[in-house]
Amino acid sequence: MLSLKKLLYPLFSLTLGIFLIWLIIRLTPVTLEEIASTVQNLNPIGISLVVITTFTHLWLTAYKWKLITQKLTSNNQTPRKFYLFYVVFANLIAQFVPQQIGLTFVQSLALKVHKVSTLSQGFFSVIYDQFLNILIPVLLLPPSVFLILGKISLPIAIFVSLGILLITHCIILQWHKPLVIFLFRAYFKIKKIASRNKQDTQLNLEDIPILSTRFTIRLFWLSVFRHGNWILRSFCVVIAGGFTINFWSIAFTTNLVQTAMIVSITPANLGFMEWSWIGGLELLGVPASVAGNFAFIQRILGIVALIAIAMGCGLSLAADRFSLVKKTLKTNEISKETWR
């Protein structure tokens, strides 16, 4: 039976997110009138680009999840549409609960319900996937912070970022297995602390799935490409809203925003994401009113794009169902004609 504490947590997280948004309106030059004016004058081409890059982001997420699941379960029968549908559905759920919780729960449960894998296999596949998603912005956070604080120049920040990615590639080649073991041990330790479980439960190393080094390298660079697409998506919001923000400011602030999502306790990082954008962009010379306006438009266009993609997935699913029913009816008619 669910405790009162667990039942009240979603309400608390939503309230906190709304409170942080209210603080932005009260403490920064951003006004609701300015946001409404920007929405009315959005560039249609920019909006289309946001939808396209959002779909690309979700497709890459589904593709990477599919690759990991197939490796862990040897299941090659489940179509890619299945993974895309549940990634979209998980992101919709994540608009109402903390993002990492929503994604982990929906994706691992989907694999179990549809008998693609066991619950533990599904859980491990989702953890692998989410860890790689988080890893890229975390790795690129140091040069981003130094650039934002004005300690290094833009060319050096770009050079260091590329160097970090190449060094990480080499580290994975050399110490892949111990890194994976460390990852899962750390995860279960954090989970134990969060759940306040006093029992000393040891994680059996044999229970940890170790994917091949070559495959992990492939996932790593796929995650880098996915992160690059997310940066492009954010810049498409700049195009849609006509903001005077340059590409590199968006690129390096994205690393800060994405890293902040690790500790998010609000639905879809509500409030935390907006404050991260405002703080990072303002330190890079973007006026607070422009940065705040951009953060809100980013949120609005993100939700609109997600709903549009979800509707497309729903129509595709309905079309598949209709086609299956039509095919079944046709098969039954042929069977009846045969027996006459």
Image: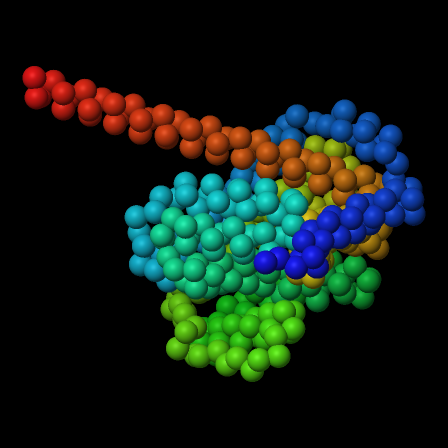
> Percent from the top left, x then y, of residue 228?
59, 51
Q: Is residue 290 left or right of residue 165?
A: right
Q: Is residue 340 left or right of residue 257?
A: left
Residue occupying image coordinates x 37% and y 30%? 320
Occupied quadrant, residue 216: bottom left
Q: Nearer the viewer, residue 201 or 242?
A: 201
Total of numbered circles in the picture? Answer: 0
> Percent from the top left, x then y, of residue 140?
65, 63
> Percent from the top left, x then y, of residue 79?
35, 44
Residue occupying image coordinates x 36% and y 25%? 322
Residue occupying image coordinates x 52% and y 72%? 184
> Percent from the top left, x then y, of residue 295?
76, 43
Is the N terminus in the top left, top right, bottom left or bottom right quadrant? Answer: bottom right
Q: Nearer the viewer, residue 198 or 157?
A: 198
Q: Nearer the viewer, residue 106 or 28?
A: 106
Is the C terminus in the top left, top right, bottom left or bottom right quadrant? Answer: top left
Q: Is residue 195 above or below residue 321?
A: below
